[in-house]
């Protein structure tokens, strides 16, 4: 009996069994005789989340489009399923052909958030693949990690053969070409890793680098130990975003997933320059898709899927320069089909005043806005280019358009934060609710969602210490006490424990791998979920492995200190990050470089030229029509 047949016998005993079956409409299953190289694309979280992830769909489509190459999906089994699989001795299987993941040639993990890393170990183990890269044999697949976490992966270095920094579209084609050649030539696993590290831009092979430490535990240097691999790995990136592959035909899930809709990436990169935002630094330069291209992709995706909602994705869709023209064009195409348009999160800008009417043509359930902080002073520190008055003016328009509820995102624990900044969160939330009363006669329904700031690698705040747990708890208590008597504002505050552990993983070095291993062995799974996170287990693991949170989190790093991710290049330069850090200290904002002058952030400015041209043209047209 096959592994899959045996798995079917216990499917009735687990939740949402259909997520483990595969066979969805839109999948690609290639006959074995046509496959020379097989990828497993693994997402270390649930099917519902992984099937909503656009990056996974892009790579699935690109790889399956290469003759001789197949890509098959696999998501983390929930704990009930993992227990049944282990009991029955069924290994981790792909959804397309139900073959064991360990039979793939390459296994690519999507690394999007640090608290999913323990699931990576659980999936490797369930697949029967040795956890430590050094223990793997020639028959084991190469294990590769991509996604934003690949820019600071040292705590995972022991478990991976390769990381891919940056855009995956062209890189996975290059990796496949080389892997195919090396396989045909009978090359060893080590030879293939070295060849990929030498020849594919963005590839980092951690075992080809040695980390040397000073006696005080700080890193002295991280250096290549094999000739021909880069001293500093620069990220891969695609220049022609307009024509980059976009998956209009994708597997259609049979079960409810987190994002049941067409999602189109309208813009890649963001140049707002918010100093806390890692994605904003890592995804530069800004690249745009044209309105015509986006509409064509939306039509094609609708024909293939029948979804009733189109989401316009990017780090800051409100900044897409031709958003009004895009929304109007999509509205013309889809209004009669009753397909809705959504913009996941709006920034508070001038355009906020016009966007709600466009988005709201279909649904007016709730709107998400991210002021991030509640005072203009702290907003200058983090370089979020808005003022409170803009927000209040925008909110008036939102209520006038018929919206009743709004979710406001904030952070606490930021550098230089004072009691006034924390209290401001409640004041701002109440005022936003009050604007609803002025306009509609009844207060708006406001949810303030508050997270704990984590100083992330490759940002201007990477040298800052993380706020201490006691300080975060005190702020949390202060917020809870203040909001309690107020019925129009609901508050959701993220727990401090998961944020601190996320920071340990994000900022850690190779010593932290021992903690991950212990956590996995002690039963850690789904740490990003309330059901999965167990603080006492983390404390035990840190203590047992002698990893000191004080050293990793709460000391300011000197500018001269070698950081665990310094050998991994981001698009932005260290000089730019230092300058931005200094400006934060002076509470100085930096103007958006799409609308103003270039700040020479480290990106090749010619790569930004096409987007800057569109921004300039749109601004000029606006000024001309205002002057007419
Ligand atoms: S190179 Fe200049 S224009 Fe391009 S992202 Fe950096 S600061 Fe902006």
Image (tube, rainbow, N blue to C red):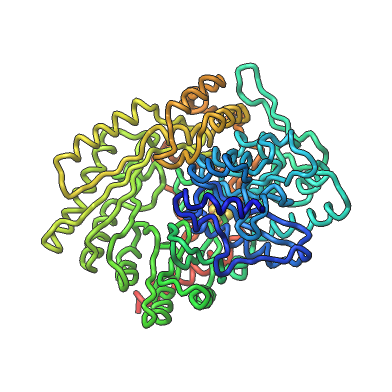
Q: Look at 42% across and 29% down and name the residue there.
A: 535
Residue 584, image x, y percentages: 43, 39
Write down the quadrant of residue 361 in the picture.
bottom left
Q: Dividing the image into four equal quarters, which quarter contains ligand 1?
A: bottom right
Is 342 displayed left or right of 546 in the figure?
left
Is 316 displayed left or right of 286 in the figure?
left
Of the pair 551 and 362, the residue shown nearer to us: 362
State which quarter of the image contains the C terminus.
Answer: bottom left
Q: Is residue 600 visible?
A: no
Residue 289, image x, y percentages: 54, 69
Q: Look at 70% across and 47% down and name the residue there.
A: 102
Write down the quadrant of residue 498 in the picture.
top left
Task: Look at the picture and state if 537 lies above or below 368.
Answer: above
Task: Look at the picture and state if 598 lies above or below 351.
Answer: above
Task: Look at the picture and state if 581 lies above or below 236.
Answer: above
Write down the quadrant of residue 450 in the picture.
top left
Is 315 displayed left or right of 478 in the figure?
right
């Amino acid at each position: 009996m096959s592994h899959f047949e045996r798995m079917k016998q216990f499917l009735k005993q687990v939740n949402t069994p259909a997520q483990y079956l595969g066979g969805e409409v839109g999948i690609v299953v290639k006959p074995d005789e046509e496959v020379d190289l097989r990828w497993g694309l693994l997402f270390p979280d649930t099917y519902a989340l992984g099937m909503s992830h656009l990056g996974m769909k892009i790579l699935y489509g690109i790889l399956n489009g290469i003759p001789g190459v197949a890509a098959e999906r696999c998501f983390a089994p929930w704990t009930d399923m993992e227990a049944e699989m282990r009991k029955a001795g069924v290994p981790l299987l792909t959804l397309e052909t139900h073959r064991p993941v360990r039979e793939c040639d390459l296994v690519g993990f999507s690394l999007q958030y640090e608290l999913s890393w323990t699931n990576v170990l659980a999936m490797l183990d369930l697949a029967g693949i040795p956890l430590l890269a050094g223990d793997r044999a020639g028959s084991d697949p190469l294990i590769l990690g991509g996604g934003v976490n690949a820019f600071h992966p040292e705590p995972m270095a022991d478990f991976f053969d390769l990381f891919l920094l940056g855009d995956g579209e062209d890189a996975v084609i290059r990796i496949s070409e080389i892997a195919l050649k090396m396989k045909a030539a009978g090359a060893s696993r080590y030879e293939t890793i070295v060849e990929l590290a030498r020849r594919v831009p963005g590839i980092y092979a951690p075992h080809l680098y040695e980390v040397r430490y000073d006696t005080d535990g700080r890193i002295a240097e991280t250096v290549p130990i094999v000739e021909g691999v880069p001293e500093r790995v620069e990220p891969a990136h695609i220049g022609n975003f307009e024509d980059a592959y976009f998956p209009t035909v994708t597997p259609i899930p049979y079960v409810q997933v987190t994002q049941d809709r067409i999602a189109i990436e309208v813009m890649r990169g963001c140049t707002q320059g918010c100093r806390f935002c890692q994605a904003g630094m890592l995804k530069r330069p800004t690249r745009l898709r044209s309105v015509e291209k986006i509409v064509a992709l939306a039509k094609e995706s609708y024909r293939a899927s029948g979804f009733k909602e189109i989401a316009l994705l990017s780090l800051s869709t409100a900044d897409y320069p031709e958003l009004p023209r895009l929304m109007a064009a999509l509205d013309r195409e889809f209004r009669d089909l009753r397909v809705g348009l959504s913009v996941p999160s709006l920034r508070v800008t001038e355009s906020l005043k016009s966007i709600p009417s466009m988005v709201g043509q279909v649904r007016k359930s709730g709107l998400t806005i991210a002021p991030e902080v509640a005072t203009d002073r702290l907003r200058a520190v983090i370089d979020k280019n808005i003022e409170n008055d803009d927000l209040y003016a925008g909110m008036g328009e939102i209520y006038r358009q018929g919206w009743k509820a709004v979710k406001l995102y904030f952070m606490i624990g930021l550098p230089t934060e004072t009691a006034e900044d924390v209290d401001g969160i409640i004041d701002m939330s109440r005022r936003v609710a009050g604007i609803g009363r002025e306009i509609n006669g009844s207060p708006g329904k406001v949810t303030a969602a508050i997270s704990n700031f984590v100083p992330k690698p490759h940002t201007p705040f990477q040298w800052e210490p993380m706020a201490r747990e006691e300080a975060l708890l005190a702020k949390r208590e202060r917020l809870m006490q203040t909001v309690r008597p107020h019925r129009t504002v609901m508050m959701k505050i993220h727990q401090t424990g998961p944020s601190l552990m996320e920071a340990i993983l994000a900022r850690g070095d190779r010593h932290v791998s021992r903690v991950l291993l212990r956590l996995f062995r002690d039963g850690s799974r789904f740490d990003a979920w309330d059901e999965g996170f167990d603080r006492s287990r983390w404390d035990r693991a840190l203590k047992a492995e002698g990893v000191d949170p004080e050293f990793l989190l709460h000391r300011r790093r000197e500018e001269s200190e070698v950081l665990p991710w310094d050998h991994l290049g981001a698009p932005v330069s260290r000089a730019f990050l230092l300058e931005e850090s200094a400006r934060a200290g002076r509470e100085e904002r930096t103007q958006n470089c799409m609308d103003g002058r270039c700040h020479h952030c480290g990106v090749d400015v010619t790569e930004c030229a096409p987007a800057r041209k569109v921004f300039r043209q749109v601004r000029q047209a606006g000024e001309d029509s205002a002057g007419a």
